[in-house]
Image: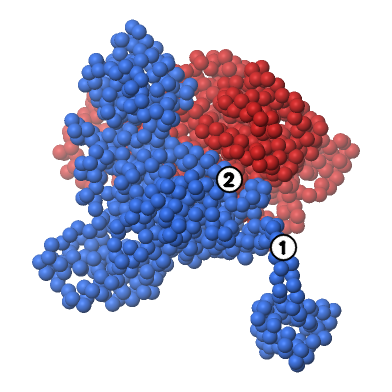
Chain colours: A blue, B red
Amino acid sequence: MAGDMTTKDGRPFDRAQLESLMKRRLFYTPSFDIYGGVSGLYDYGPPGCALTNNIVDIWRKHFVLKENMLEVDCTMLTPYEVLKTSGHVDKFADWMCKDPKTGEIFRADHLVEEVLESRLKGDKEARGEKVEEKEEDPKKKKKKVKNIAAVKLEDAVVQEYEEILAKIDNYNGEELGLLMKKYDIKNPATNGELLPPVAFNLMFQTSIGPSSNLPGYLRPETAQGQFLNFAKLLEFNQQSMPFASASIGKSFRNEISPRAGLLRVREFLMAEIEHFVDPEGGKKHPFFEEVKDVELELLNRDVQLAGKTHVETTKIGKAVKTGLVDNETLGYFLARIQLFLLRIGADPKKIRFRQHMANEMAHYAADCWDAELLTSYGWIECVGCADRSAYDLSVHMKKTGAPLMVREPRKEPLKIEEWQVDIDKKKFGPKFKKDGKTVEAAIESLTQDLREKLSLDLEKEGKIVVDVPSVGSGKVEVPKELIAIEKRTRVENVREYTPNVIEPSFGIGRLVYALCEHSYWARAEDEARGVLSFPPTVAPTKVLIVPLSSHGDFKPFVRTLSNALQDIGISSRVDDSGASIGKRYARNDELGTPLGITIDFQSVKDNTFTLRDRDSTKQVRSSLDKICKAISSLVNGTEQWSDVAARLPAFEGQDVD
Amino acid sequence: MAGDMTTKDGRPFDRAQLESLMKRRLFYTPSFDIYGGVSGLYDYGPPGCALTNNIVDIWRKHFVLKENMLEVDCTMLTPYEVLKTSGHVDKFADWMCKDPKTGEIFRADHLVEEVLESRLKGDKEARGEKVEEKEEDPKKKKKKVKNIAAVKLEDAVVQEYEEILAKIDNYNGEELGLLMKKYDIKNPATNGELLPPVAFNLMFQTSIGPSSNLPGYLRPETAQGQFLNFAKLLEFNQQSMPFASASIGKSFRNEISPRAGLLRVREFLMAEIEHFVDPEGGKKHPFFEEVKDVELELLNRDVQLAGKTHVETTKIGKAVKTGLVDNETLGYFLARIQLFLLRIGADPKKIRFRQHMANEMAHYAADCWDAELLTSYGWIECVGCADRSAYDLSVHMKKTGAPLMVREPRKEPLKIEEWQVDIDKKKFGPKFKKDGKTVEAAIESLTQDLREKLSLDLEKEGKIVVDVPSVGSGKVEVPKELIAIEKRTRVENVREYTPNVIEPSFGIGRLVYALCEHSYWARAEDEARGVLSFPPTVAPTKVLIVPLSSHGDFKPFVRTLSNALQDIGISSRVDDSGASIGKRYARNDELGTPLGITIDFQSVKDNTFTLRDRDSTKQVRSSLDKICKAISSLVNGTEQWSDVAARLPAFEGQDVD
């Protein structure tokens, strides 16, 4: 797939060139570089940081402001107990194998996959077949298997390998260990024996407070903090459902061996929404009508299970109607995600929505779609949109007893016929003594069916026998003097339910990287230099101010322009270096600056300036006031360059090189 | 002091009332509350989060945009080596004592302070003197010493205690241990013996990667990441000095026993600027002229050393001229900090700048002023402005060899007369064998004075004797055949220097809390409910939309208003609950919402609405368009309510209760 990738203008894409640009222009840089760096940790320099901030800003407007979501900011430090309850302590892990001799550590599934793939490749070579390069997978950028031996395999073995590879995400540690034994998978570099796979939890551990008695982790997602505050948020929302909370912040995953640049890192910015919705009534969304005609490229579960990857262009309204997308709320967010991706400048031809297969869903998810962006690393999950059902609220409620649920008055009272148990507490205590509470609890927890059956026993035999494992023989006899069981009607005026959660979760760093690939191209006349055609709203810096030369006459104009732009909240940079205007613009093409103002000798005479469009390199000339207005509307997205060019006189006099 | 604190309208301030409001309205809430909470960790709910975001946004405009600072975003995970070099591993610690019986842990300096203070108080009681309540200190919100015994002390002892208390910040662990022994300081609750003080490092520790072989910490400040990237940032800035980098992000301190709510927490948002400046030439700042007339309340070092706290109102231009503030750059930032604090709504009467005394400066600081805000906890450091000199860049450069310095062409080449040593390497090696390099290095590092002296020896005695501790007897003889020492002139065309760093560092959480205290008051007619008079730019939500009742006719207007405000990027909330309009406005007074729009029956008739000012409760009535324009200019700070009230017709018809 990498070979097929094209730049924004349709030429072959060269990743090395883009990554070199991004590092040279300080979009990002390895953290602690002068100390040798730490893999999976990157710093964002000024353009990367501004790009990130602008995307976050648009995200906040597009989602939080639009729907009055309740934004919260919870701590990253999280005590053990919370993540034990959420399931992360037990399940948020990868399997790793250690080479006891070299100390090297391998991620078990990646190793099995890579070794079997290399053997299949060797087999093809031995059979004289053409070896096609498979779609490159970001998980395997640095191959462990360096040399592929052309060894023919038996046909049955080839089939076995292919079947294993098809479900590689489906094995647990023990199974991976068995595969490694069975197929003699060792350290590819040394052929040394590896220890069996052990679970490696991906959370960073620390301890909180001076006495080291409160173990904690850095959060792996922002979601848990939102769940824990559910009751308070519902109260803040004046008990009105549905509603959403949102959070933007860093999360942490201690990847076993992070690679693929910004795509798999140990510390990353997330933006997550938790939309709380009544599980009854089809999970409707009040604004679904507004988006029902948005078209998405959907890659559904069945197509993938058939080993295919073709997408279907579908209006979200239809996808929900046919049940392909489970419910309106999920559908609403898929459409809103699509609109967001377009708004920040993703290439519509490089967006698809892929449904998770059953075996790849996280431990809490009931259904899940990923918004994937096509990059030179393949299709990359940039946004997950999961239906987490009532999982999280339920487990935290069960653990803490906090009322993480909704209580709402019923329009019509609900009448329930049920078997009720009455215990005569005065006699109960003296009879069972210290076991009283336990026996009582066992009786209270009897199902309706059992209660009905026991009511007959009581009538027939004057007593019942109840299973109470921890008391005496495990069977407890209760005579009818102590208990009554009757069918009665109970009226419920209040409905209690645990909301379901639809969670759109955005990996901002991945979006930033994918966006750079989607925005990248090079001018035919200067292929060595790239251009990053970010939309003005997203671009790190909006305007480059370029005085024609270092002539003193230009200086006051530089200051005037800077201040005027600052006053309207627009970021500009001045480049008054000695380089030619063409070189200075080329530098800013690489920074993705959409607009340039040149101060030339005519400016000094008549106070007019030229405004240049990055993508077309066309220029117009006008007064400060009109130039500022044009910039403002371009940056706010209310006008396109074509509108400005139609309004203001074109300028072609100045030679920019 | 707490007793003297007043609300915005000059009445006595009741902290419990404000804190109850802030928790009730979800400005903040203890993190993991349903799990019992973790001290020193707080989550921000919707209003707190919006308030924080707005302050950060203003900060970015006021500092980053204004001066084209290079904003970066570096990781929080930081390897051991970096923080070892910066001095944090060794010095970023507090002293703690453990009670071996109860397991309780005390911060040693706080304990000594508290016990001695309580004894002094007991002494006063015993002498029948009036015991004044001292200014409350946030470090001691929960007193360890519960009961004060009225025991008279000898006069000499009183004096000793007072002297110790005056310099309590000045003792190291050993000294604190001696004090505890000498004055018999034990666990106040049980009178149990405590173990001697041990250093407790305040950084959270973790390990990076699967093999646990890379120890790391969560950063205690954002500064280090900025220093490590200095060379790249200078390059990005096209080698131009001075310049500043900036960073906004979370930092972490594992406080021994955090208290005082948002003021002393374990995870907090910082905004830090590192302004890099040439140490020569007086550390001028290019924009100093613009701020020189800004007046600050300065509390200088000498006044404090004399045991006083009176401030002097001084123009920053004068303070720099007299040398009270060391240099222009430091002065520039103090003034800019003052302007920022006013812009976000801090009470000018509750701001002062306090110079650090020599013994309280951080291990890296050369000079430091704190911007302190007066709160019910006393004067609280919210912004530190330190001159970190060349400390950080120097230590990282020394450790890594990376060129964290500036090289600039000299306007005039510099001619330096110096004693140069020539070594005959061909003969040197054979003579000294394995010690050759060591002897050579020892010679290279000789001072100019020594070189001059040795040149005479060489001439007189035909040899020199050099101290090389690790070789032979420690004295090495070098004959003149191997060495020459001559005075020559060297010409330097390039100047190399390590910049100094001026660091304004903002604790955003503390600002948020102090701002809430400064903005708080209550209406005379409804003292139970508070009002938070944030400036519109800072307020969490800008507009409350209130339909007079739940009448269906109002619904479309609610939607129209919401959308119109959204389109101009202004956050609003609708309150269509059944409560009276007065109650609904009162709720939003507590949330600090500055503006309210009421939809009433006249709106349905003529499409006009009333706009209400939170502080005066005055209303005007106008069309949607004019109301939106007024809101926009109020929120952007280009107009005050008085301007709007002068422009639009007043409205007094509707009764709001």
Please say whether residue B218 is visible from this viewpoint. Answer: no
Left or right: A261 as drawn, with respect to B276: left
Residue A381 in the image, given as x and y percentages of width and height: 37, 53
- Residue B16 vs A381, above or below: the answer is above
- Residue A586 vs A516, above or below: the answer is above
Question: At 23% from the left edge and 35% from the top edge, which residue is drawn?
Answer: A522
> Which residue reaches farthest right?
B128
Residue B376 in the image, given as x and y percentages of width and height: 72, 35
Left or right: B136 as drawn, with respect to B84: right
Disc 1 marks a residue whose amino acid type is Pro
Q: Nearer the viewer, residue A559 or B627?
A: B627
Place residue B275 in its image quadrant: top left
Place residue A409 in its image quadrant: bottom right
Question: At 63% from the left edge and 29% from the top edge, which residue is drawn?
Answer: B607
N-terminal-most mark, 2 or 1 = 2
Q: Nearer the viewer, residue B509 or B434?
A: B509
Pointer 1 chain: A
- Residue A404 vs A342, above or below: the answer is below
Q: Nearer the viewer, residue B23 or B279?
A: B23
Q: Which mark is residue A70?
A: 2
